[in-house]
Amino acid sequence: YYKWFNNGMQKFNKWDSKLAKLIKISFLKFNKIYGYKILTLIINKIYNLSLKAHMLYRYMKYLNLKSVQRIKKFKYKLSSGPFRYENLLSQNFRTTELNQKLGTNITYLLTNKKTYYLSIVKDFHNNQILDYQISNNLGTNFVLKNIINAWIKAGKPKTWILQSDQEFHYTNQNYQRLCNYLGIKISMSKRGNPYDIDHTESWFRTMKSEFLNQISRKKRTTKWIISNLPYEIFKSKICSKN
């Protein structure tokens, strides 16, 4: 206490002005959207550092850097098909390697003129988006193409358990036949239980908060979506597990 008092009662011990500047620049570079945990991962990856999350938290608090709040997602309903499958995961998303447990899901992308739909396949082991597809309608073709492309990029494994909800895209005969042909085990969430698909829903929430909702809908064009969405997909690789 006396050492701190004699040093002028500094609010921050071992203050590094260069590090503070780097943190502030990185925070502003990503439009104030990242909290201290994700920002720590990004700074360590980009600048090859070994910063601790609690250290970044202290710097951000002292610099008064606060991330933006996420906007609540819009909910939409789709009629469901006839096929149902057991929930093989039951919220157990733990894995020991790639290509064990994955998730697929769909969300909307609002532009100034149209509504598009985004389908993803995500590996739960490293949280990477293996493939994504965009469609201007809610047909099933873009979902099937998404799964095929992800399966090929993953090396055509026979070990997948693919988790989805019970919407039409995953309860129809074409989806069933494709998964059987590729050797994919189908797992479906229980009705009314969002936690069963939270692994994919959480990525959608983050993507919309950090990317889509950064500009108003009036300024969102189809070209802007198509040009910038790949970078958001690439960020999933940066923030994935080592």
Image (spheres, rainbow, N blue to C red):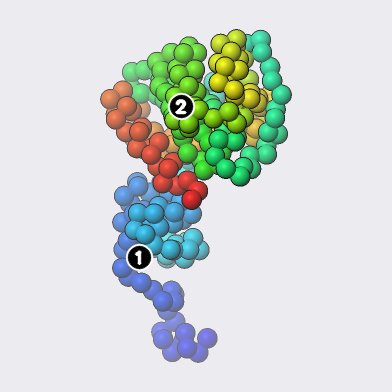
- Say which amino acid is labelled 1: Ala
> Considering only vertical position in the picture, is 7 above or below 214?
below
Looking at the picture, does residue 237 appear above or below residue 9? above
Place of residue 237 in the rendered image (x, y in percent of width and height, measured from the top left) = 42, 42
Left or right: 129, with 101 as reference point: left
- Please tell me in which quadrant of the rendered image residue 51 appears: bottom left
SS label for mark 2: helix
Residue 223, given in percent of the width and then of the height, sits at 28, 25
Q: Which residue is mark 1?
A: 20
Is residue 209 visible from the viewing direction of this image?
no
Q: Nearer the viewer, residue 191 or 188?
A: 188
* 177 and 55: which is toward the camera: 177
Q: Residue at x 62, y 11 (%)?
A: 81
For label 1, the crowd category at 10 Å Cα-Cα, with few meaning under 14, some 14 to 19 and many 20 or more, is some
- Please tell me which residue is depicted at 35% across the width and 66% down the height of the picture: 19
Could you say which disc has been placed on residue 99 in the image? none
Q: Is residue 173 above or below residue 187?
A: above
Instruction: Name the secondary structure under disc 1.
Output: helix
Q: Is residue 60 above or below residue 240?
A: below
User: Viewed as shown, does residue 17 lie left or right of 163?
Assistant: left
Q: Residue at x 47, y 84 (%)?
A: 4
Which badge, 1 or 2, is on the more N-terminal residue? Answer: 1
The residue mark sitting in front, 1 or 2, is: 2
Q: Is residue 112 something that shows in the picture? A: yes
Circles 1 and 2: CB atoms closer than 8 Å: no
> Which residue is under mark 2?
152
